[in-house]
Amino acid sequence: MLGVLVPSETLPMSCSESMPLVVILMGPPGAGKGTHAGPLSEQLGLPHISTGDLFREHIRSQSTLGIQAKSFMDKGNLVPDVLVLDMLFDRVSKVDCKNGYILDGFPRTMPQAKELDQRLGSRNRIIALNFNLPDSTIIERVIGRIACKNCGRPFHKKFDPPKIEKVCDNCSGPLHQRDDDKEEIIRKRLEVYRVQTEPLINYYAKQKSVLKEINSQNAKAQVFHDVMEALPSTPTAVSR
Ligand code: AMP
């Protein structure tokens, strides 16, 4: 867990006392979205929903959706919107999302962002956190990252190594590198990010009080602190 303690009276609201809060984690691959999503989910009491993880679950269970998605993911391309949208909206319709949720890896295209806005209407508070990082750092970060096959806990070979090599600190599961984190694929994913996803920064910047910039080059604890600071605060403690 990160070394940042946030006093309960200054915690951002999980919105059971207000509108549901939808936090969108944006930024290129390797910018820290997945790293901070877990602790943020714990701190806010809101579910972490990663479309990449949902697809990987479908791939593991060899569902039709998983088989379709894999052919795009293996090449570093985005999965077509039509396949993403149904899966995502099905997930966020579950009861655990009633007070809000944290989106990691969604939206990634303009049609996805517009569809999300349309579904949410004005009944939700949206905050888009843009984790920015220079290109030079991205490749180094991504090719070193590994994650637990069982619980998904992320590690980094150089910056955040497990206590025992290839073994998860959390559940002792085996650690592995994602196929699409290999260098040639990550270069392709970055290119796709620039063309299809980066324009969303401007889209959210035009909406009042939605976009917050996070300097992801800082130390992990500092980044998490900045994330918490960027969220709306409430004088009362979070209710879970
Ligand atoms: P991630 O785990 O977020 O890096 O996503 C891994 C891969 O899943 C991406 O490179 C895409 O192929 C696919 N993917 C995840 N989320 C989306 C999305 N919102 N739209 C399209 N493809 C996605």
Image (spheres, helix red, strand yellow):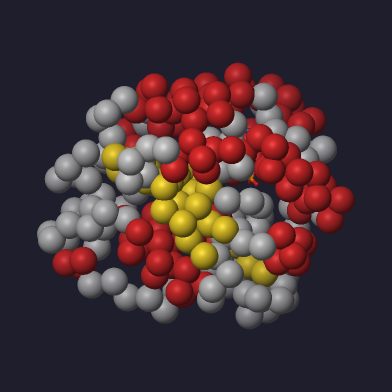
- Using the image as rendered, state which of residue 216 and residue 23 is in the foreground: 216
Q: Residue furthest right?
A: 184
Q: Position of residue 71 (x, y in %)?
A: 79, 30
Q: Residue at x 66, y 35 (%)?
A: 196
Q: Position of residue 17 (x, y in %)?
A: 14, 45
In the shown orientation, is residue 42 left or right of residue 14?
Answer: right
- Using the image as rendered, state which of residue 178 and residue 106 is in the foreground: 106
Q: Is residue 106 visible?
A: no
Q: Quadrant of residue 193?
A: top right
Q: Position of residue 39 (x, y in %)?
A: 43, 62
Q: Position of residue 94 (x, y in %)?
A: 37, 31
Q: Quadrant of ligand 1?
A: top right
- Using the image as rendered, state which of residue 92 and residue 174 is in the foreground: 92
- Using the image as rendered, state which of residue 42 and residue 104 is in the foreground: 104
Q: Residue at x 76, y 43 (%)?
A: 191
In the shown orientation, is residue 199 left or right of residue 166?
Answer: left
Q: Is residue 166 visible?
A: yes
In the shown orientation, is residue 231 left or right of residue 89?
Answer: left
Residue 93 against residue 82 in the figure, above or below: below
Q: Quadrant of residue 176?
A: bottom right
Residue 184 against residue 157 in the figure, above or below: above
Q: Residue at x 44, y 43 (%)?
A: 205
Q: Residue furthest top?
A: 82
Tell how many labels: 0
Specify the quadrant that holds the N terminus: bottom left
Q: Residue at x 41, y 32 (%)?
A: 92
